[in-house]
Image (cartoon, rainbow, N blue to C red):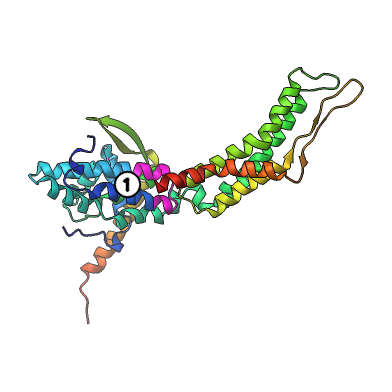
Amino acid sequence: MKRETVPNYLNGVPELLVLRLLKDQEMYGYELVQAIRTATGEAIVFGEGVVYPMLHMLEREDALQSRRQTVAGRSRIYYTLTPAGDKRLTQAATAWTRINEAVGGVLGVPVRA
Amino acid sequence: MKRSAACLGCRCVPDLFNTLKDRLIRAGVRPANVSRYVAELRDHLDDLAAEGIANGLDNATAQQQALARLGNIDELATPMIADRRFQSWASAIPWAVFLLVPVLGQIAIMAGTIFLLTAATSAGAVPPWFGAATIAAQYAIGGLVPVLTAWIIAAIALRQRSRPIWPMLGIGAVVCIGAMLHLPVVIPAPGQPGMIAMALMLPALAHLLALLGLATAPFFLNHSKART
């Protein structure tokens, strides 16, 4: 099964998506990855396991908090956004919008010889 | 069996997680981080395999697809290893964890013991338990403390698969200090002052070897366990 990876120019996008999706509701890792796949129409697909180092780091930086809950005999770790994470999301979203508009502007201008 | 779907049809999964765990710990990632990461990956793999089965795949195919979606061992290991914030102290500053802190701890215990013994006495007033306490303190400083400290060093080093140089230096240092430190105590007699001192003396060979043997026992036990 061929799996695409996140190109280098999308550095920071997975984090932005994670923060945005966890703003709406708490999720555990598998749920979160499926939410990313669904929300992006599978345009952004990566090795699903690599979401965990990102979650752990965001938690270390107080952007997320976690709680352990046993569901159907299995212990799951649910993540949710903190106020600091919400602020980080706002900053990241603003930066992304600015870059998106700038790149869109360049791509929208026809190249003249 | 707890690992239901993901464990069926493919024997490579435990190997993947054991290899990943071993690689991360050898690279200096904190064991607590590694355990949590691997546990979450196992659960994620179970969920992916269950999703595949629910979509009509057979166990083996669901397992293979789940593994492919989870990521290969390099993809899974690299983010944890590359981020220095996941590193354990024993990996980042081994000289401090295995040498400096144990030696300073040993000296602090010695100083604390002297302080407590001194505080328990006053001119002309020695509690009845003082003689027994000084003997216990001497055995602790010359035997129990260095051996326990060495075992803690060994436990950390073995758990984190550390390179042996700093743990061995640390164990050597605490053993030497344990064999060289002495706590001479003179209980005050009527008309004569007492004395509590800290002395550094050349170690007796038998004492040194005995401490060394006890201190390094965990390494030999682990080595023989690994061979069997």
Mark 1 residue element? helix
Name the residue: 60% across, 51% down. B169
Q: Which residue is mark 1?
A: A52
In this rendering, does residue A63 appear at all? no
As drawn, which residue projects farthest toward the top? B128
Q: Position of residue B123 (x, y in %)?
A: 85, 22
Look at the image and say whether residue B29 sits in the magenta stretch: yes
Residue depicted at 55% across the width and 54% down the height: B165
Name the side, left or right, on which B116 lies relative to B166.
Answer: right
Judge left or right: residue A35 versus residue A52: left
Give the camera-side residue of B136 and B161.
B136
Q: Is residue B20 above or below residue B109?
A: below
* Quarter assignment of residue A23: top left
Q: Residue furthest right?
A: B191
Comparing B144 with B17, the one in front is B144
Along the line of sight, the residue nearer the viewer: B142 or B43: B142
Percent x, y for residue B16? 28, 50
Instruction: Tell me the quadrant of the picture where the N terminus of chain B can be found.
Output: top left
The chain letter for the residue carrying disc 1 is A
By secondary structure, the bulk of the magenta-drawn segment is best described as helix
Q: Does residue B39 appear anywhere in the picture?
A: yes
* Number of numbered discs: 1
Position of residue A54 relative to residue B214, above or below, is below
Let me know if residue B169 is in the magenta part: no
Q: Which percent across, then down, holds residue B3?
A: 23, 38
Q: Amino acid at mark 1?
A: Tyr
x and y percentages locating residue B116 in the rendered image: 72, 27
Towards the viewer: B166 or B88: B166
What span is colored magenta in the figure?
Answer: B24-37
Residue that lies at the very extreme toward the left in this rendered image = B56
Q: Is residue B72 left or right of residue B203?
A: left
